Image (cartoon, rainbow, N blue to C red):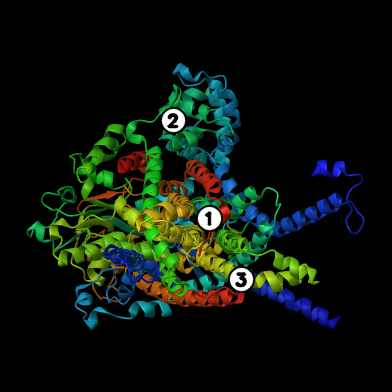
Amino acid sequence: MKSMHTLATAAAATMLVASAAQADEMTIVSWGGAYSASQQKAYHDPYMANNPGVTIVNDESSAEAVAKLRAMDEAGNVTWDVVDVVASDAIRLCDEGLAMEIDPATHLAPAPDGTPAAEDFGDLLVSECFIPQIVYSTTFGYRTDVAEWGGKSPSTVCDVFDTATFPGKRSLEKRPINNVEWALLCDGVAPEDVYDVLGTDEGVAQALAKLDTIRDDIIWWSAGAETPQRLADGEAVIGSTYNGRLFSVIEEQKQPVAMLWDWQVFDLDGWIIPAGLSDERKARALDYIYFATDTQRLADQAKYISYGPARKSSAPLVGKHADLGIEMAPHMPTDPNNAKTTLLYNYEFWADNRDDIDAKFQAWLVQ
Amino acid sequence: MSALPPYASKAQIAWYYGFRVICALIFFFLIVPILVIIPLSFNASDFFTFTKEMLALDPDGYSLKHYRDFFTNPDWQQALRNSVSIAPMATLISTGLGTLAAIGLSQSHVPFRGTIMAILISPMIVPLIISAAGMYFFYSRIGMQGTYWGVVLAHAALGTPFVIITVTATLVGFDKSLVRAAASMGANPVTTFFKVQMPLIMPGVISGGLFAFITSFDEVVVVLFVGSASQKTLPWQMFTGLREQISPTILAVATVLVTISIILLTTLELLRRRAERLRGMSPG
Amino acid sequence: MSTMTDNQSGPMLAADGTPLKVSLARALRRQKIRAFLLIVPLLAFILISFIAPIGDMLFRSVENGIVPETMPRTVVALEDWDETSGEAPSEAVFAAFYEDMKVAMEEKTHTKLGSRLNYDTAGIASLFRKLRKPMGNIDETQPIKPQFIDAEEDWGDPEVWQTIKRLSGYYTSSYFLSAVDMESTHDGIQMKDDFERIYLTLLWRTMVLSVAITVSCILLGYPIAFLLANLPLRTSNILMILVLLPFWTSLLVRTSSWIVLLQQEGVINDTLVSLGILDDQGRLELMYNQVGTIVAMTHILLPFMILPLYSVMKTISPSYVRAAKSLGANDWTAFWKVYFPNSVPGIGAGAVLVFILAIGYYITPELVGGTSGIFISNRIAYHISSSLNWGLAAALGVMLLALILVFYWLYDRIVGIDNVKLG
């Protein structure tokens, strides 16, 4: 009998330990590569140091996050705790009830000077469910050693469309977003009218017609790592990608490439918490978000990757790159010298028109 | 095609060598992508590019850093461990069930044989993206998405057609009178299977098993959907690598895997020779 | 057999005294049961782990429960509305819609419904997303319709209601219509505008490219299989390793390797330029077009051609060709009239296998195919993971699968699936 009892206790103890281990594993979903590494150093490692009981498991599924969350929701089994997504995906998740609403007043740290979080993030809180971490931009890089350019270098985004002065292949993202805006801007549409024009069939046709003028010189990309590789190879002479990738090519890899900030398109990347978590997991996820989005943590991330922190109060704290020791502020997309002409990703417009314009864009591509 | 006879005409000699040159070129086509990745995996830069230093054979252009990355980076090591724990289990299931089913299918008078065969072969012919999405939705619903067994079962399903095909092929050449002979001498069906049938169809089972193994080991689309972080396999890690941060570590991994493949293939060939000796066929 | 036994005076008996016919039938039945028992575990496994998921996925191509389930009252009320009238529906419909949306907003299902309707008519998603504004200020004692239209005039647009009415059933053909570049409007079913057609073009291109890949696999695979089949086994098995090695190297790695080889600044172009064959300005475009897709896919699928072809050629007895030659045929005639016809089943087996596999690939075309070298599977993948239009992805999947099944059926008829050998 006694041995039975011991056995039962041992079994119960094992189960407890097992369930405790389960409870203390927190799955955080992000993009992988250098970006995840910067989050690991700036957020995960210090968080785990403060909370020795918690283990953070990294899942690199952000690219499929919306599809996977929707399927998890259908199945009623959400296995993720915190998910890093771009703002447009966050809005979609929030709309569909797949992400929980987070109240900045109660769930986010105020700035060191006491400014409430809602004010510190300002306009960047584009959805009730979304806490932005960084401002990144999609912009152009070009090779600085192209002989055919005769010493000239591109100075505006419209030089991308000027294949006579700047011959060579262009690397552009295989989707309409950003490309159609740039096309219209370079086709004489005033910046403030871009989305009104794009809202019509004629406007989309106009943008595609402009892209058609350089069609044979475009190599399309679908993964962020492709443009840097092509620029390093010389396969493309000018190409769009995320500004952090270009920073890495220029400063870390020392390739002969330079930035073209003109009409960079700002976008946000940040956290959501999936809806439908247990109270315990929800509390832990909120605790993590409170920690990881405070002023100092957001500024810390900029040490490892050149994306701008989403809080105003973090900007003055941005220091030097952790390995290279160079000042990071001039490499931030939000730096006044870089942000002379900018667009902000139009979430509202693309949420409505993405399917439709994408269908036209794809049809144009296969022609 | 064997040796050229002494009386061969000039045209025959020309054709004999011309044909061999054509074949050599095709073999070159088959092997050149693998030859390219080996030097690139020793690249000192972080791109898939033959740098000037490399072309000048300057030692500075080469480095072992991508190998170091593979062997020390916990992400790659975890991915390797996952691949090594998923692929053998999936292979075991698909080989076990596949061999039994192939033996069943080789009997005469199996009703609905064509339909059954089509169902069993289907994982090979359904486009992967459709399989991946289907399994993803379905496995989510039954709580298998993101689990070890979910990935194993998905990979086992993808591997079975290869086992069915290779084992059926060996059974076509199988002399059924051997089974009858064993039975007439008093062996029960189980003994007959293990003592007579099994050794003879073993080459088919092994080669089917290797195909199933490689299917799981090289599979990226399904695992990307059905798996979660804790099942991240080598191909998944490679895929993330290609998408997020191009790094020749992928090529270092591939070089290591190619080396392992060569060892596996050589083993397979040795096994084949042994099996053929057992079957009493000429070793050629 | 029966006539024979009938003619005999009594039934033939087996050793244990039962009629032979019964005994044989029993043995046959036992054999069938044994075969069946061997097959059942795998069959059950594949049915559950593979066929059920595929069926489940493909069912999404017609499933449309979200509309009638989210707005049950509206769907009933809309039955009386004449969609050709060119006017917004009556107060009754708006009242029903108001009731439905109260529930839907409570459950947060209204935006999902909006996304679904947006697949058919762009712009509806935002009407549903911004429902809070008209819904929040409704005075329930007053007529609902004018309040809705005052708050958001697009609710008075008959096109919105036409879309809802068209999609009000539990099942819909709208995904399949989209998948063949058609749309259903209140004027009936018609082709989409030229500049919006894509899927039929892509399907056709997928077929054409797959045929091109198959043909190049035959051209490259035939000599290799012939060589392997006619060399001594030891030599051919060593060479076989060269065939299998690429087969066993990660698909992603081989594709990356082709990028390194084929791009304009790549190994092939660099070599040609340094040999002086090409001018530096005149580098060949070998990638991001159909050439890239064909070359890389041929490489990936070539072993699937060589292996079945090789196993067929192994069975062609060399004495046939010798006999032909001894009867006076020259080498070419002996090959073309005797050897080649015997190897045709191998070509058939390899060709259909390669074709079926090619038609479903998507990672390689995505990376090397640019815009002209991509396949329909690329769009399926896009709709599954990016646009989340799973219904359309399923409809495209059904079309692709149907096409493949036709080829599988042909394959089974012409070659027989049992005759495929892989090494």
Of A221 and A216, the residue lying toward us: A216
Residue type at numbered disc 1: Met
Q: Is residue C292 above or below residue B215?
A: above
The residue indicated by pointer 1 is B124
Secondary element under disc 1, as helix, strand or loop, is helix
The residue indicated by pointer 3 is B202
Secondary element under disc 3, as helix, strand or loop, is helix
Q: Position of residue B206 (x, y in %)?
A: 57, 70
Secondary element under disc 2, as helix, strand or loop, is strand
Q: Residue at the spot x=35%, y=51% of the render?
A: A123
Evaluate whether residue B90 shows in this view. Answer: yes
Residue type at numbered disc 2: Glu
With A246 as the anchor, is C282 left or right in this view? left
Q: Is residue B108 above or below residue C203?
A: below
Label annotation for residue C183? 2
Q: What is the chain letter for disc 1? A: B
Q: CA distance from mark 2 to mark 1?
A: 33 Å
User: Which mark is nearer the camera, 2 or 3?
Assistant: 3
Instruction: Answer whether labels 2 and 3 touch (C-beta < 8 Å).
Output: no
Q: Residue at the spot x=85%, y=53% of the render?
A: C23
Q: CA distance from mark 2 to mark 3?
A: 56 Å
Question: 10 Å neighbourhood of mark 2: few (<14), some, or many (≥20)?
Answer: many
| Same chain check for tags 2 and 1 | no
Q: Residue C222 sits in which quadrant?
A: bottom left
Q: Residue at the spot x=62%, y=68% of the render?
A: B201
Q: Position of residue C147 (x, y in %)?
A: 47, 26
Q: What is the chain letter for disc 2? A: C
Residue type at numbered disc 3: Met
Evaluate whether residue B74 shows in this view. Answer: no
Q: Position of residue C211 (x, y in %)?
A: 39, 47
